[in-house]
Amino acid sequence: MSMAAPGRGIERTLREMFGDAGVRGWLHVAELHRPTAAVTVDADEAVLMGSVYKVPLAVAYGRQVDAGVLDPGQRVTLPPQDRLPGPTGISQLRDEVSMSLRDLVVMMMSISDNAAADAVLHHVGAAAFDDTCRALGLFRTQLNDGAAGTLARLLAETGAQSVDAAMARIADNDRAVPPSVYDPAWATSTTPAEMARLLRAIWTDEAASPDSCAFVRRTMALQPWQHRLAAGFPYDEVAVYGKTGTFGVMRHEAGVVELADGRTYTVVVFTQAARADRRLPRADSVIGATARAAVEHLRGRE
């Protein structure tokens, strides 16, 4: 815990909540403008982050736009045979798609479009991603080729002939999953503490120019998913910005919660379920439940 001894009770409560939902949990919740006021659960451990990598990628894109390296209006054409597989967006379309680089970022952040993210990464470049992370103090956040690299290694580890077959393989509770599939050393990974640091930099306009930070915040407000972080704050007067990440038994969300009274919190909750079922509602909803418990604990200490 980042807090003094009295905070040990909330950590125990959060661990119990994760356990009751059948998941291992990692958490970092902090006041935006007073980051030392934080509740954490194993927040400095490296975890495979799935599509949460799209947040630092969006920041790297913004920094390159700021520097004049990238033109946000540049048209990008994605033929169907070269697109990265994914459950949403362009990956599901059969015909050639052309849109601006800026709109591809909106697609990857709002509906977690893998094909859009892969195209954005191609233009931003892995070196710029790494440079952005280092410049912002994210020394344990590593790309490892993003979603494309993760899927390629998944195919190699499972011996499957397609991504769908590989995902079905790791969703089978009766078959052992190769341990390296969830090893953060070979996949796109980070720590909850580093993602919290990045969110704070985005919300305080320190990650990139004010315009680019505002753009990233807007894309995170467009996310339609309500079953994880937003489920803990189901009120019209509460604004929730988020980016989910899902890979096999991993279910995550990193975001920001703005309460009606103006108090704002960075929230990062990563989970790993004990079961491989594709639908585990309690594993999703515990993300919002633990986030709310941590926020309420911090409010009670003010």
Image (cartoon, grey):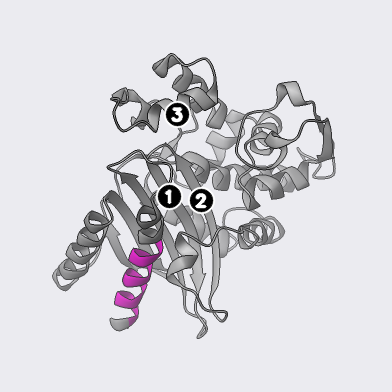
Magenta segment boundaries in residue numbering: 288-299
The residue lying at 84 percent from left, 36 percent from top is 98
| Amino acid residing under circle 2 | Thr
The residue lying at 79 percent from left, 26 percent from top is 79
- Does the residue at mark 2 contact the one at mark 1 (Cβ under 8 Å)? yes
Question: For the residue carrying disc 2, how many other residues have a C-alpha within 10 Å: few (<14), some (14-19), or many (20+)?
Answer: many
Q: Secondary structure at mark 2?
A: strand
| Amino acid residing under circle 1 | His
Q: Quadrant of residue 65?
A: top right
Residue 38 in the image: x percent, y percent? 32, 66
The residue lying at 49 percent from left, 46 percent from top is 245
Dividing the image into 4 quarters, which one contains the N terminus?
bottom left
Dot 1 or dot 3, earlier in sequence: 3
Q: Is residue 91 left or right of residue 243?
A: right
Predominant SS along the magenta part: helix
Q: How far separated are the C-alphas under marks 2 and 1?
A: 6 Å
Residue 243 in the image: x percent, y percent? 54, 53
- Does the residue at mark 3 contact the one at mark 2 (Cβ under 8 Å)? no
| Amino acid residing under circle 3 | Ala
Q: Which residue is mark 1?
A: 252
Dot 2 or dot 1, earlier in sequence: 2
- Magenta run includes residue 292: yes
Taking the view exactly as shown, the residue that stands out farthest to the front is 174
Q: Which residue is mark 2?
A: 244
